Image (cartoon, grey):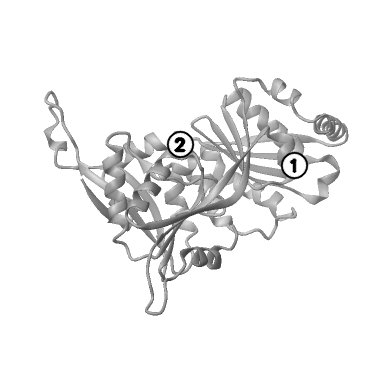
């Protein structure tokens, strides 16, 4: 077992597919598709990818006949990082990342985490920022404990709220019955008004249709209040790349033949993640955004059969109408102790200066 760093995703051993397959079931943000798209489209100037890993030779039992696999490395742990031009590094995440974690195989976890912690201690960073993380993440909690034993200082603080809903097998009708009366009444009234006064339809784009449908998506987005929001290249790439395994749900509401509202969701291993919502201000009187959200809720609950719906980052009031539960996500800052010639450097002061209260 040894610590090893890679610079490109293609350098990972073939066994990486097994680790991503295991960890990706917990969150789309742990999938290879997410990480590769993110690192290909959204790195900032001066950042470079560093994949901190623990590998070991594949173990074959006595009955195995595939001896050719014996010399190939098995990926046991992976911590995707972004190296910067200074000594303050961070994890491979983005403002759209709703969860980050250490990808860890199920066997020999204690030894694997110790090996990873020892290797991280040799890398030339002073602070390493991991965000957003769950406070009950066993993998990261094990890594934090192992690093603290090696002299690291670790600080956790609040990062953001995350609204979500667990379906518990309910139908869309049962889900909507739990929503605020004002929301239900507004959607019903506005939908009737829209259908009475205009020619309207909703279309779901999946698979090979997604790339072409992005034109209509952008038409609605460019006429919305979010017209100047950043990171379009990342979201376009995600929509196309995640359509290959049929994870993309791109829905467009058309009014009189025009794209009046568009939403980009992803459904991965039973969890729906709501990424981007937009509507043309010219059609505001019909509440096209709310109508389309309700339509997508019905789709992912009744057709996809999801177990969880996640509104990702932020504590906006409208999310409370659609979701039923809220959890916190934190920032974990790991720092190596050091001293200057004059006096010890306060790690807490460094964290406060670099990242503020949050």
Q: Using the rendered view, name the quadrant where residue 274 is placed.
A: top right
Can you give x and y, in whole percent of width and height, for residue 48 in the image?
39, 63
Circle 2 SS class: loop
- 152, 291: nearer the viewer: 152
The circle on residue 318 is 1
Is residue 179 something one can see in this rendering?
Answer: yes
- 220, 81: nearer the viewer: 81
Query: Total of numbered circles in the picture?
Result: 2
Within 10 Å of the Cα at label 1, are there few (<14), some (14-19), or many (20+) other Cα atoms?
Answer: few
Can you give x and y, in whole percent of width and height, for residue 238 in the image?
51, 47
- 17, 201: nearer the viewer: 17
Q: Would residue 49 be found to the left or right of residue 111 on screen?
A: right
Can you give x and y, in whole percent of width and height, for residue 206 in the image?
55, 36
User: Which residue is depicted at the point 62% across and 23% down?
Assistant: 302
- 349, 169: nearer the viewer: 349
How far is the residue under mark 2 from the one under mark 1?
Answer: 31 Å
User: Which residue is depicted at the point 63% across and 45% down?
Assistant: 161
User: Which residue is depicted at the point 50% across and 63% down?
Assistant: 348
Q: Which residue is mark 2?
A: 245
Is residue 257 something one can see in this rendering?
Answer: no
Q: Using the rendered view, name the quadrant where residue 65 is placed.
A: top left
Q: Earlier in the sequence, mark 2 or mark 1?
A: 2
The N terminus appears in which quarter of the rendering? top left
Q: Residue furthest bottom?
A: 342
């Amino acid at each position: 077992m040894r610590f090893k760093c890679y610079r490109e995703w293609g350098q990972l051993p073939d066994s990486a597919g097994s680790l991503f397959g295991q960890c990706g079931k917990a969150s789309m943000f742990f999938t290879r598709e997410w990480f590769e798209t993110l690192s290909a489209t959204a790195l900032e100037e001066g950042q470079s990818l560093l994949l901190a890993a623990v590998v070991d030779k594949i173990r074959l039992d006595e009955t195995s006949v595939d001896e050719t696999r014996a010399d190939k490395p098995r990926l046991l742990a992976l911590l995707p990082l972004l190296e910067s031009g200074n000594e303050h590094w961070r994890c491979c995440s983005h403002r759209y990342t709703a969860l980050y974690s250490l990808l860890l195989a199920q066997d020999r976890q204690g030894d694997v985490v110790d090996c990873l912690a020892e290797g991280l201690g040799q890398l030339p960073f002073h602070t390493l920022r991991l965000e957003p993380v769950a406070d009950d993440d066993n993998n990261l909690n094990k890594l934090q404990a192992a690093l603290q034993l090696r002299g690291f200082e670790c600080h956790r603080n609040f990062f953001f709220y995350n609204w979500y809903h667990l379906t518990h097998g309910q139908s869309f009708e049962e889900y909507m019955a739990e929503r605020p009366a004002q929301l239900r009444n507004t959607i019903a009234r506005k939908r009737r008004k829209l259908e009475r006064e205009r020619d309207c339809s909703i279309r779901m784009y999946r698979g090979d249709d997604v790339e072409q449908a992005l034109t209509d998506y952008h038409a609605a987005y460019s006429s919305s209040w979010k017209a100047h929001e950043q990171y379009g290249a990342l979201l376009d790439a995600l929509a196309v790349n995640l359509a290959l395994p049929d994870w993309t749900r791109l829905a467009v509401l058309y009014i009189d033949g025009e794209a009046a509202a568009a939403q980009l969701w992803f459904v991965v291993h039973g969890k729906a993640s709501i990424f981007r919502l937009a509507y043309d201000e010219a059609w505001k009187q019909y509440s096209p955004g709310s109508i389309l959200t309700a339509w997508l809720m019905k789709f992912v609950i009744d057709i996809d059969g999801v177990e969880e719906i996640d509104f990702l980052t932020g504590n906006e009031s409208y999310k409370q109408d659609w979701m039923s539960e809220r959890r916190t996500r934190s920032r974990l800052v790991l720092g190596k102790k050091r001293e200057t010639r004059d006096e010890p450097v306060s790690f807490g002061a460094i964290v406060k200066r670099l990242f503020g209260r949050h």
